[in-house]
Image: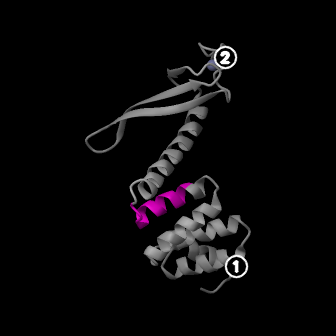
């Protein structure tokens, strides 16, 4: 068992979470010297190191998603950068976090700024599908397909829907 030095319990449980990741950026822009800092929520202490490989990967995926959400949300709301890129980034994060209504709102914002963004039409369709609104999903898949989006075309062809 991988014991926590602070609370004495198994570190591989929900009382121990990834607090942040620190890294340097290489000249080519890649993250290097990555260090994970975990928090024992029982005592509030933080330590550098890993849990098991799997927990570490899961926590990191979520961390990066939330970090990206934070960055795009700050760009829109704090720095007032209301451009398609930030709405798209935030919309994708919401979609990945299964917050479909927020995802749709952001993706529609992207579409109103750039009606030819096929990815946003497609992801908007996927979000409506997850909410059980199939008519709206199909309408967005059709728009994506007409703009050349491959997955949207495949999806509609498989269902026998003309676009
Ligand atoms: Zn602990």
Ligand 1's image quarter is top right
Q: Secondary structure at mark 1?
A: helix
Query: Residue drawn at (65%, 25%), measured in percent from left and top?
Result: 12
Crowding at dot 1, Cα within 10 Å, few <14 / some 14-19 / many 20+, comes out as: few
Query: Residue drawn at (31%, 44%), measured in percent from left and top?
Result: 29
Query: Residue drawn at (63%, 67%), measured in percent from left and top?
Result: 126
Which of 97 and 3 lies nearest the eye of the viewer?
A: 97
Q: Residue furthest bottom?
A: 162
Q: Which mark is residue 135?
A: 1
Residue beneath label 2, please? 1
Instruction: Determine which quarter of the picture holds residue 132.
Output: bottom right
Q: CA distance from mark 1 to mark 2?
A: 51 Å
Q: Position of residue 88 (x, y in %)?
A: 48, 63
Q: Secondary structure at mark 2?
A: loop
Region rendered in magenta:
81-93
Q: Position of residue 100 (x, y in %)?
A: 64, 61
């Amino acid at each position: 068992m991988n014991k926590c030095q602070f609370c004495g319990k198994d570190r591989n449980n929900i009382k121990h979470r990834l607090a942040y990741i620190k890294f340097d950026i290489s000249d080519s822009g890649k993250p290097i010297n990555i260090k994970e800092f975990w928090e024992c929520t029982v005592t509030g202490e933080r330590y550098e190191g890993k849990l098991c490989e799997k927990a570490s990967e899961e926590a990191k995926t979520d961390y990066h998603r939330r970090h990206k959400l934070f960055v795009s949300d700050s760009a829109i709301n704090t720095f007032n950068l209301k451009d398609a890129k930030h709405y798209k980034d935030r919309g994708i994060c919401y979609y990945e976090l299964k917050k479909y209504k927020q995802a749709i709102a952001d993706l529609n914002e992207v579409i109103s700024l750039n009606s030819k963004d096929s990815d946003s039409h497609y992801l908007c369709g996927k979000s409506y599908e997850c909410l059980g609104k199939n008519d709206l999903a199909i309408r967005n898949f059709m728009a994506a397909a007409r703009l050349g989006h491959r997955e949207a075309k495949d999806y509609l062809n498989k269902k026998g829907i003309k676009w």
